[in-house]
């Protein structure tokens, strides 16, 4: 019973942390007011660094399945952490959508001879 109570407190604290560290733009995106790596924003919560959209998903939607990643499906804004704009999907589905949107960067050589 105490563990459940503690888990609920952590979830409520995470939700409050996310809400206190975002601004909402005209598209309804929650943009984290914290630092980032140029592409994604990050939150420090309970001594650990999270990508902002991942902590938001954990706080408002629950655990992420082992083979899933969090995709910015609705807005395609990597700095958004609005849980209504996110979805859990496989990395493969995430990359397919990324390439379809013209944002993909392939590290594989697709034409020519790779040996020179």
Image (cartoon, rainbow, N blue to C red):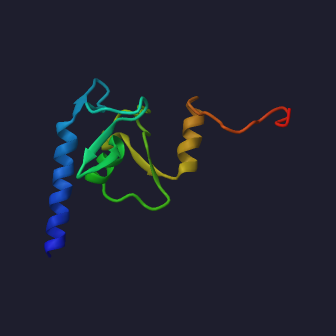
**Nearer to the camera, 67 or 50:** 50
Q: Residue furthest bottom?
A: 1
**Nearer to the camera, 90 or 14:** 14
Residue at point 27%, 44% (across, down): 44
Q: Based on the displayed image, in which of its 4 quarters is residue 110 positioned?
A: top right
Residue at point 43%, 61% (across, down): 65
Quadrant of the rendering where the N terminus is positioned: bottom left
Residue 73 screen position, x and y as percent: 44, 40
Quadrant of the rendering where the C terminus is positioned: top right
Residue at point 44%, 33% (across, down): 76
Residue at point 52%, 53% (across, down): 90
Residue 102 screen position, x and y as percent: 58, 29
Q: Based on the displayed image, in which of its 4 quarters is residue 86 positioned?
A: top left
**Nearer to the camera, 16 or 27:** 16
Total marks shown come to 0
Q: Based on the displayed image, in which of its 4 quarters is residue 95 positioned?
A: top right
Residue 39 screen position, x and y as percent: 43, 31
Residue 47 seen anywhere in this rendered image of the structure: yes
Residue 81 seen anywhere in this rendered image of the structure: no
């Amino acid at each position: 019973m105490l563990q459940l109570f503690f888990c609920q407190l952590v979830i409520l604290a995470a939700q409050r942390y996310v809400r206190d560290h975002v601004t909402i733009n005209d598209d309804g995106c929650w943009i984290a007011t914290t630092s980032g790596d140029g592409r994604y924003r990050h939150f420090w919560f309970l001594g650990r660094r999270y990508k902002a959209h991942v902590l938001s998903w954990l706080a408002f939607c629950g655990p992420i399945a082992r083979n899933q990643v969090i995709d910015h499906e609705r807005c395609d804004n990597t700095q958004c952490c609005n849980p209504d704009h996110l979805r859990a999907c496989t990395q493969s589905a995430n990359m397919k959508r990324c390439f379809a949107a013209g944002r993909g960067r392939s590290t594989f050589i697709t034409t020519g001879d790779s040996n020179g």
